[in-house]
């Protein structure tokens, strides 16, 4: 599937870059996200190479220091409110800039899917929905309802996005952790009965 359209190198070299950027347990998660993302891409008519590159890079920045993220927010003049958040919000939104600058990936569909993979967004392309869902339902995930939402992602992708967003929001509220405003916008767009 790799023809070097989105990354200047082979799949093996991108896998090696991902592996070098993170712990083994997270790297294994990334490989499982890739497998699920390619299956969803086949199902929903998205280019498999596009899905593979996005999946292999979605958590590229997850183990970077807070100082690295704060420096990138300043360098790229990103939304100043980002400094009030933390790794969970940064590794996608700010991490996409590291993927662009360090791995040379320029494709905006891929960069946007990385940006949106944790919080979602009111409008998501099919690729963004696939990465958001593959991250949540990869074969190593285990939580109540995981089998149902896995099936739903292959039956009604948008409904599965709504399912994840509703459950994630309920989980954040249950734990009394701050909800990123973008997550609320995603909930209103995807998870509310119309
Ligand atoms: P991972 O990187 O593969 O572990 O998965 P994600 O990138 O999807 O999520 C990372 C963490 O961010 C998870 O623990 C989510 O529950 C959490 N998260 C998702 N949305 C929000 C939010 O709006 N606010 C905060 N504080 N955390 C969030
Ligand atoms: Fe992530
Ligand atoms: Fe996720
Ligand atoms: Fe992930």
Image: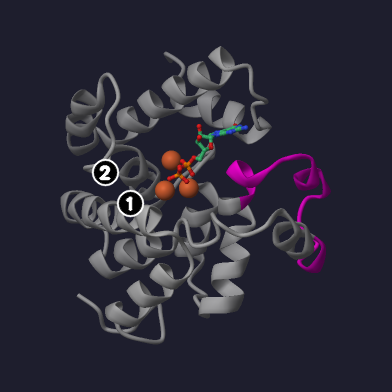
Disc 2 C-beta below 8 A from ligand 4: yes
Give residue 6's position: percent from left, percent from top: 40, 77
Q: Earlier in the sequence, mark 1 or mark 2?
A: 1
Q: In x, y percent, where is residue 172?
A: 55, 22
Q: Residue at x 20, y 24 (%)?
A: 148
- Residue identified by numbered label 1: 29
The 10 Å Cα crowd at callout 1, few under 14, some 14 to 19, many 20 or more, is some
Task: Say whether residue 176 is left or right of residue 128.
Answer: right
Q: Are marks 1 and 2 in contact (CB under 8 Å)?
A: yes
Label 2: which secondary element? loop
Quadrant, the C terminus: top left
What residue span does the magenta drawing correspond to? 74-90
User: What residue lies at 46% left-to-right and 54% top-to-bottom?
Assistant: 113
Residue 156 numbered tag: none
Q: Is residue 25 magenta?
A: no
- Say which quarter of the image contains residue 55: bottom left
Residue 3 vertical position relative to residue 96 in the rendered view, above or below: below
Is 65 on the left or on the right of 32, as rendered? Answer: right
Q: Secondary structure at mark 1?
A: helix
Between label 1 and label 2, give the one nearer the viewer: 1
Figure disc tally: 2
Q: Which mark is residue 138?
A: 2
Q: Is residue 158 or residue 100 the one in the foreground?
A: 100
Q: Quadrant of residue 182?
A: top right
Q: Which residue shows up at 76% across the image and 66% down it? A: 76
């Amino acid at each position: 599937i790799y023809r070097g359209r989105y990354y200047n190198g082979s799949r093996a070299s991108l896998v090696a870059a991902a592996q070098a950027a993170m712990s083994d347990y997270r790297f294994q998660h990334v490989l499982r996200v890739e497998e699920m993302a390619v299956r969803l891409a086949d199902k929903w008519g998205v280019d498999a190479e596009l899905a593979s590159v996005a999946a292999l890079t979605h958590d590229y920045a997850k183990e970077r220091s807070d100082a690295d993220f704060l420096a990138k927010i300043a360098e790229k003049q990103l939304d100043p409110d980002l400094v009030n958040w933390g790794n969970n919000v940064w590794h996608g939104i700010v991490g996409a800039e590291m993927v662009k600058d360090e791995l040379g990936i320029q494709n905006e569909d891929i960069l946007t899917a990385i940006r949106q993979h944790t919080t979602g967004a009111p409008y998501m392309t099919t690729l963004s929905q696939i990465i958001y869902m593959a991250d949540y339902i990869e074969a190593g995930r285990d939580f109540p309802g995981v089998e149902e939402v896995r099936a739903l992602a292959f039956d009604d992708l948008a409904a599965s996005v709504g399912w994840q967003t509703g459950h994630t929001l309920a989980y954040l509220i249950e734990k009394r952790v701050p909800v990123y405003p973008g997550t609320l916008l995603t909930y209103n767009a995807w998870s509310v009965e119309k």
